[in-house]
Image (cartoon, grey):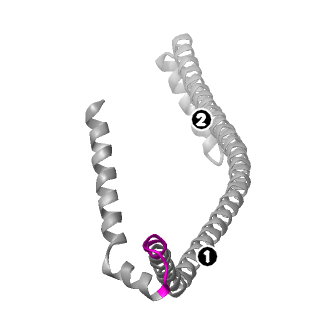
Amino acid sequence: MRAPLLMRCCVAAGEDDDQAQFKHSASVQMVAKLTGLSLDHAYWLCVVLNFAIVAGAVVYFSKKNLPGMFRNRTASIQKAMQEARQTSEDANRRLAEIETRLSRLDAEIAGMRATAEKEAVAEEARIKAAAEEDGRKIVESAEQEIAAAAKLARRELTTYAANLAVSLAASQIKVDPATDQALVRGFARELSPKGGSGGGPDEN
């Protein structure tokens, strides 16, 4: 507690010393002589004058530099606002483009789906027609094979029947030499021009 109090006392004492030195300075004494004021009044007059000079200098430089600073600041703010406006417009434009693309994308998807469905139906019809054509060709080929097999079977059956008939006839007909000669003479008479008149030699 004592150390801070001592420090404050030292600071106050230093300030009092500075104030006393300024109060008894040559400039304050000269102002007191020129104005006829007391030393205290001259001191306060000097303080006021110093403050006025500093304030005037601040105002002067502020008037000289602050408008430019304000203008630059205003210009930068306006530029930032313009950039923000442009950015907002670009964002809105891009958003509108995206929404337009999305709407077109929905339409494109619907069109692609309809096209795919049509192609699927056409492909199904094509496959069905090809299957029917293949079935028809298979049936025609089978019918041709059946007809050929039946024709071959009929031919083989006819051949077999003819051979069987010849075999049966050969087994049933028995011709002796006298009958064979009589048949040959009769056949010869039929072939000769006079075969029917009996102009040949007598036969026993």
Please provide percent x and percent y for residue 43.
Answer: 43, 73
As rendered, which of 158 and 120 lies closer to the eye? 120
The span picked out in magenta is: 35-44
* Residue at the image position 53 percent from the left and 22 percent from the top: 163
* Residue 30 shows in this picture: yes
Type of the residue with mark 1:
Gln
Mark 1, secondary structure of its residue: helix
Q: Is residue 136 above or below residue 59?
A: above
* Residue at the image position 50 percent from the left and 75 percent from the top: 48
> Is residue 39 in the magenta section?
yes
Which disc, if any, is residue 187?
2
As rendered, which of 150 and 100 lies closer to the eye? 100
Name the magenta segment's main secondary structure.
helix
Are discs 1 and 2 less than 8 Å apart at CB? no
Q: Is residue 160 above or below residue 144?
A: above
Measured in 3D between alpha carbons, the distance from the residue under mark 1 to the one under mark 2, in whole angstroms, is: 143 Å
Which disc, if any, is residue 78?
1
* Residue 197 shows in this picture: no
- The quarter in which the N terminus is drawn is top left
Which mark is in front, 1 or 2?
A: 1
- The quarter in which the C terminus is drawn is top right
Please provide percent x and percent y for residue 107.
Answer: 74, 54
As rendered, which of 98 and 105 lies closer to the eye? 98
> Is residue 110 in the magenta section?
no
Q: Specify few, some or many for label 1: CA neighbours under 10 Å numbering under 14, 14-19, or 20 or more.
A: few
Q: Which residue in the rendered view is the most extreme toward the top?
A: 172
Q: Specify few, some or many for label 2: CA neighbours under 10 Å numbering under 14, 14-19, or 20 or more.
A: few
- Tell me which numbered mark, 1 or 2, is placed earlier along the sequence: 1
User: Which quadrant would residue 88 be assigned to in this image?
Assistant: bottom right
Q: Is residue 80 above or below residue 30?
A: above
Type of the residue with mark 2:
Phe
